[in-house]
């Protein structure tokens, strides 16, 4: 019986490796039209305002305040006129507040940061296992 050559199989492995390397190196191209979208502008304007407010609140929070409080969302700036864009601003503010709060809290309590990471992970798991439970929804939305 004649022994088979592994040459074609090695060539296939080489092609797969090159394809994987290409996927790791490739970067998506950003569309120019998305940068001028008023909804994105409103969201990111709200997010940056929320991050600043959240950082301040996070630095002032005590070590037991693992989850951010509900932010009081200010009125959107006067240059945001449409109702949907105002909602995008509020959504961005809420997201930015949460991120800023977490960043500010972690900067003030670096020793407790692993505890917060574990708390956020458990909260996320509870949200996945019990999606309709109001208690886990509140905990997850705030962490």
Image (cartoon, grey):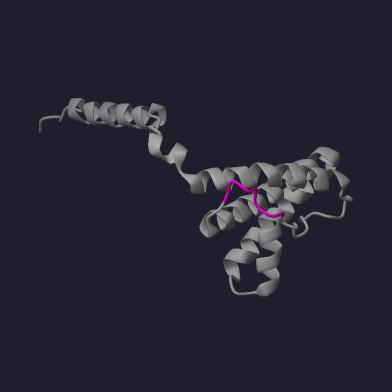
- Residue occupying the point 67% across, 73% down: 134
| Position of residue 94 measured from the top left corner of the image (x, y, whole percent) | 66, 54
- Residue occupying the point 54% across, 43% down: 41
Q: What secondary structure prevails in the magenta region?
A: loop
**Would residue 70 appear left or right of 2 to someone viewing this image?**
right
**Identity of the residue furthest to the left in this view:** 1
Picture quadrant where residue 113 is located: top right
**Would residue 74 appear left or right of 129 to someone viewing this image?**
right
Q: Which quadrant of the figure contains the C terminus? A: bottom right
Between residue 84 and residue 48, name the one nearer to us: 84
Q: Is residue 110 above or below residue 131?
A: above
**Would residue 84 appear left or right of 14 to someone viewing this image?**
right
Magenta stretch bounds: 74-80
Asked whether residue 135 is drawn in magenta, I would say no
Picture quadrant where residue 12 is located: top left
Picture quadrant where residue 110 is located: top right
| Position of residue 3 measured from the top left corner of the image (x, y, whole percent) | 15, 29
| Position of residue 97 measured from the top left corner of the image (x, y, whole percent) | 71, 49
């Amino acid at each position: 019986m004649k022994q088979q050559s592994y040459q074609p199989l090695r060539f296939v492995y080489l092609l797969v490796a090159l394809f994987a390397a290409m996927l790791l190196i490739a970067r998506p191209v950003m569309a120019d039209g998305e940068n001028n979208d008023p909804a994105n502008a409103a969201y990111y304007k709200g997010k940056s305002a929320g991050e600043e407010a959240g950082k301040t609140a996070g630095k002032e929070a005590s070590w037991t305040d693992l989850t951010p409080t509900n932010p009081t969302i200010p009125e959107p700036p006067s240059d945001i006129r449409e109702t949907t864009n105002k909602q995008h601003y509020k959504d961005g503010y809420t997201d930015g507040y949460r991120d800023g709060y977490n960043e500010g809290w972690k900067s003030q309590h670096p020793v407790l940061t692993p505890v917060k990471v574990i708390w956020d992970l458990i909260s996320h798991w509870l949200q996945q296992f019990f999606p309709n439970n109001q208690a886990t929804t509140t905990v997850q939305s705030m962490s």
